[in-house]
Image: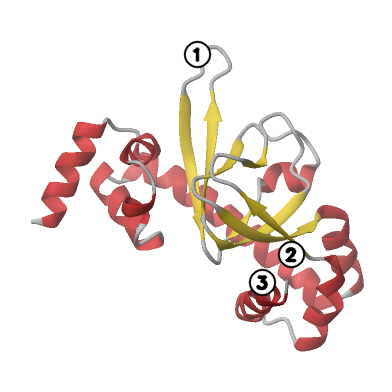
Amino acid sequence: MSHHFETLKAHLANFAALNEKDIADSHMFWRTRDIKKGDFFNMQNMVCNDLGLVVKGIFRIYYADPDTGDEKNIFFFSENQFLVSFRSFITRKICHYYIQAMEDSEIIYIAYRDLNSLYETYSNWARFGRLLAELFFTYSQTRTEELLFITHEERFIRLLDEHPNIINRIPAYHISSYLGITNPSLSRIRKRINR
């Protein structure tokens, strides 16, 4: 826990300028969890009860069509990113997605009720909540605008900027699914970029 908590402390101080006391007073609420490759942080049709920080590993958020079983990758989260189905987390309604580890992963997480207790007790934690909401709103709007306004190649470059070694960590078909293209199209994009 101590190694994970040091990672968390650095991230919280950087993300929301939380001070030593704010972070120390939250210590009792945080837990660690190892999630094996292929296992889930959250399941489709369940309420997302925890906010995690990825200490090690990479996760995909994906939708599985109940009729066809087809899977569509929507987001990836890797080290030093918060992990949550944010709409489900704040509304307490079921999540429409799966959140799955794509390699053996480690997270540190806090339960919804404990985070809300921090929001109500500390003004700096309330600010953290606002910044978290702004972050996930930005993720969502950026993803929508990418699908509307930029090319598959530009989307791929942005993905590499956000997760620099993703191409070496997960199978290419997962990246194709995220970009909304076929594997051969992804191969052509990679060749053009490498030139």
Q: Residues within 10 Å of mark 2 (few under 14, many from 20)?
A: some
From the image, tell me which residue sits under label 3.
4
Q: Is residue 46 above or below residue 36?
A: above
Q: CA distance from mark 1 to mark 2?
A: 37 Å
If the image is split into quadrants, where does the C terminus sit? bottom left
Quarter assignment of residue 100: top right
Query: Element type at marker 1?
Result: loop
Q: Which residue extends farthest bottom?
A: 20
Image mark for residue 129? 2
Please report the residue visible at 66 percent of the width from the left and 50 percent of the height from the top: 84
Please report the residue visible at 60 percent of the width from the left and 55 percent of the height from the top: 136
Residue 117 position within the rendered picture, expressed as x and y whole percent measured from the top left: 90, 64
Residue 152 position within the rendered picture, expressed as x and y whole percent measured from the top left: 27, 42
Amino acid identity at mark 3: His
If the image is split into quadrants, where does the N terminus sit? bottom right
Query: Element type at marker 3?
Result: helix
Taking depth in this image into account, of 90 and 185 the one nearest to the observer is 185
Image mark for residue 68? 1
Amino acid identity at mark 1: Thr
Residue 44 position within the rendered picture, expressed as x and y whole percent measured from the top left: 66, 31
Residue 106 position within the rendered picture, expressed as x and y whole percent measured from the top left: 61, 59
Q: Is residue 114 above or below residue 11?
A: above
Amino acid identity at mark 2: Gly
